């Protein structure tokens, strides 16, 4: 008797598994695991750096009102849970990504929207499909890509998208355990920036590519040049 594998299982069997690719060190001396996925090498952890490449400190702003009003790059710790920083990384506003002093070590950069799409395409995810808007889901506008089983390569080791949560422009925190957004290096405008990531809703894992207020706080992953 011949048994036929479901398409997604066949696809998964043909995909080369991600593999560890050594380490990367930031301006603070923090060392991160990296992972090779296809032709790309990504950080396998969220960034925790607190200084720009020239040694200038990135502003640490835990206060809600100060977070909303700042006009400089800043970072914060989700709900001031310092014990979780090693696992989840820090939350940065979009101005950190735009700052010319840079936060990526030599040979690394903030990934663009196209970098994220290349990652999804590698795992067989259709990046051209847009899910219809609904009135029952509170989700940011932007491109939505249906999930496929191969997205588990991002959720589990070695990429480890851990749903670190984020910070609203007004300083409130939300989403730990439900969403994982990272800033994109693709330019938008002076008030908004692109971000990409995964959200875990009742309908399953969803990929997002959207623009949002530059004052929001999201994680950062870097990609090797």
Image (cartoon, grey):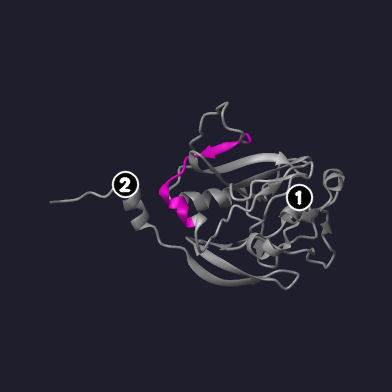
Highlighted magenta segment, given as a residue range: 140-153
The percent position of residue 133, horizontal first and vertical second, equals 55, 28
Give the image quarter of residue 210.
top right
The residue depicted at 47 percent of the width and 49 percent of the height is 121
**Dot placed on the residue nearer the N-terminal end, 2 or 1:** 2
**Secondary structure at numbered mark 2:** helix
**Up-down relation of residue 202 to residue 28 (above or below):** above
The percent position of residue 179, horizontal first and vertical second, equals 60, 47
Residue 113 in magenta? no
**Secondary structure at numbered mark 1:** loop
Query: Where does label 1 land, which residue?
Result: 93
The residue depicted at 33 percent of the width and 51 percent of the height is 9
The residue depicted at 63 percent of the width and 63 percent of the height is 87
Could you say which disc has been placed on residue 178 in the image? none
The quarter in which the C terminus is drawn is bottom right
The percent position of residue 75, horizontal first and vertical second, equals 78, 55
**Up-down relation of residue 208 to residue 98 (above or below):** above
């Amino acid at each position: 008797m011949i048994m036929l594998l479901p398409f997604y299982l066949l696809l998964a069997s043909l995909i080369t598994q991600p593999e560890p690719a050594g380490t990367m060190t930031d301006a603070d001396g923090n060392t991160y695991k990296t992972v090779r996925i296809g032709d790309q090498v990504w950080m396998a952890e969220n960034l925790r750096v607190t200084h720009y490449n020239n040694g200038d400190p990135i502003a640490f702003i835990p206060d809600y009102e100060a977070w909303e009003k700042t006009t400089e790059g800043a970072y914060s710790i989700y709900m001031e849970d310092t014990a979780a920083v090693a696992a989840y990384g820090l939350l940065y506003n979009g101005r950190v990504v735009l700052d010319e002093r840079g936060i990526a070590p030599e040979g690394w950069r903030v990934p663009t929207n196209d970098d994220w799409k290349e990652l999804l395409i590698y795992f067989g995810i259709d990046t051209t499909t847009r899910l219809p808007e609904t009135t029952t889901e509170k989700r940011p506008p932007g491109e939505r890509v249906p999930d496929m089983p191969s997205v588990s390569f991002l959720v589990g080791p070695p990429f480890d998208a851990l749903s670190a949560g984020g910070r609203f422009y007004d300083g409130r925190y939300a989403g730990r355990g439900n969403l994982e957004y990272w800033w994109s290096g693709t330019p938008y405008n002076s008030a908004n920036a692109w971000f990409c990531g995964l959200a875990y809703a009742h309908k399953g894992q969803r990929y997002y590519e959207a623009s949002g207020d530059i004052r929001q706080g999201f994680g950062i992953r870097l990609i090797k040049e």
